Image (cartoon, helix red, strand yellow):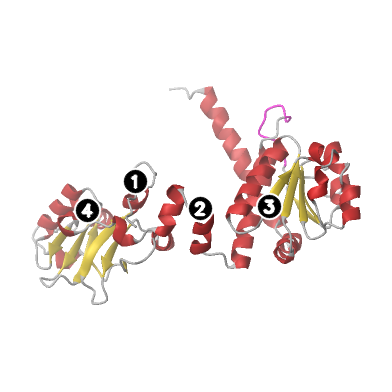
Amino acid sequence: MKTDPSIVQAREVLRIEAESILDLLPKVDGNFSRAVELIYKAKGRVIVAGIGKSGLIGKKIVATLTSTGTPAIFLHPVEGMHGDIGIMTKEDVLLAISNSGETQELNMLLGTIRHIGTPIIAFTGDPRSTLGASSDVVIDVGVKREACPFGLAPTSSSTAALAMGDALAVALIEKRQFNEKDFFKFHPGGSLGLRLMAKVRDVMLQGRQIPRVYSGSGATAAIRVLDSSNKGFVLVTDRKNHLIGILTDGDVRRLVRKEQEFTNRTIDEIMTRSPKTIPADLSLAKTIESMQRDEITALAVVDKDQKLQGCIHLHDILGRGGTLKISISF
């Protein structure tokens, strides 16, 4: 069956844009470090400026910076030429975005900005351009080609600038030692704020909801519990509720692939001992970090005596469709 041409084209666009981002890696160099240091030490704000698509990318960068502890505002260059440049002080840092580096409306502001004493960081595809030559720090975000078949519409170039903006914001998060409590201050409402505030105990499965069998149970019986629970795992405890092990869908698949007999074996013979665990008072943000670090999607919740309190799956945090579903009482 012939593939739909639109699918072929879409895949090509994604490939080109992905390559454009990867091509930025060697460009993250000493200039990037200087930009981070300049913003980190600034007593004022990051003022981001750009025209057209670069302006839209700039607004997104502003949103990311402000929500992660770096005060930032957007300045439209045309409005800047008509008085709004008055918001700028020598305590601020200008992040100017222009792929060509020759955007007239933006470059017309550079002399005044220099007079004010505001340091300039440039995101440009041409470090030798007017913008590049007028900036204190130049970060090369140039791309080999646009994903647009005519090479006219900003596609790869805007994606590259956006990705570099994210890189800058995240580097500043680390530099400022910005943590989840700080994050919540800027996200008191919405699902993100709830996720950061909620604890494992708020969403974990408890009691009969936990897919669990006792040590000594038959392997076949344990697999039936695993299958019927639809959680992808079954936990194993002793009669005093101490966690002993875990059996996952992946464990069963590996047994089948190896053609290992398990119908006459106990769960203790095929389970994984000492599974990963977390305490009930751990934040959901830290829980997700732990899952990502260990490349797992489920964790057992235990107390200080290793007694099973509950379990949590990534789906319990994000919901089956990827949307957070938490209800918290204050």
Residue 118: image location, x then y, percent: 83, 56
- Taking 166 as reference, is 8 above or below it? above
Q: Secondary structure at mark 4?
A: helix
Point 60% across, 34% down: residue = 13
Point 86% across, 37% down: residue = 104
Q: CA distance from mark 1 to mark 2?
A: 20 Å
Query: Which is the main secondary structure of the residues drawn in magenta?
Result: loop
Task: Report whether residue 20 is seen.
Answer: no
Tag 4 residue? 256
Give the mark nearest the N terminus, 1 or 2: 2
> What kind of residue is marked 4?
Val
Tag 3 residue? 72
Give the mark nearest the N terminus, 2 or 4: 2
Q: Secondary structure at mark 3?
A: strand
Q: CA distance from mark 3 to mark 2?
A: 16 Å
> What kind of residue is marked 3?
Ala
Q: Left or right: 296 with respect to 54?
A: left
Could you classify mark 2 by the number of other residues whose Cα lies within 10 Å: few (under 14), some (14-19), or many (20 or more)?
some
Residue 12: image location, x then y, percent: 58, 34
Using the image, tell me which numbered label, if any, was put on residue 319. 1
Q: Which residues are magenta?
A: 144-152
Could you classify mark 1 by the number of other residues whose Cα lies within 10 Å: few (under 14), some (14-19), or many (20 or more)?
few
Give the mark nearest the N terminus, 1 or 3: 3
Residue 287: image location, x then y, percent: 38, 61
Mark 2 near mark 4, Cβ–Cβ under 8 Å?
no
Tag 2 residue? 187
Q: Along the line of sight, which residue is nearer the eye, 168 or 249?
A: 168
> What kind of residue is marked 1?
Gly
Q: Nearer the viewer, mark 4 or mark 1?
A: 1
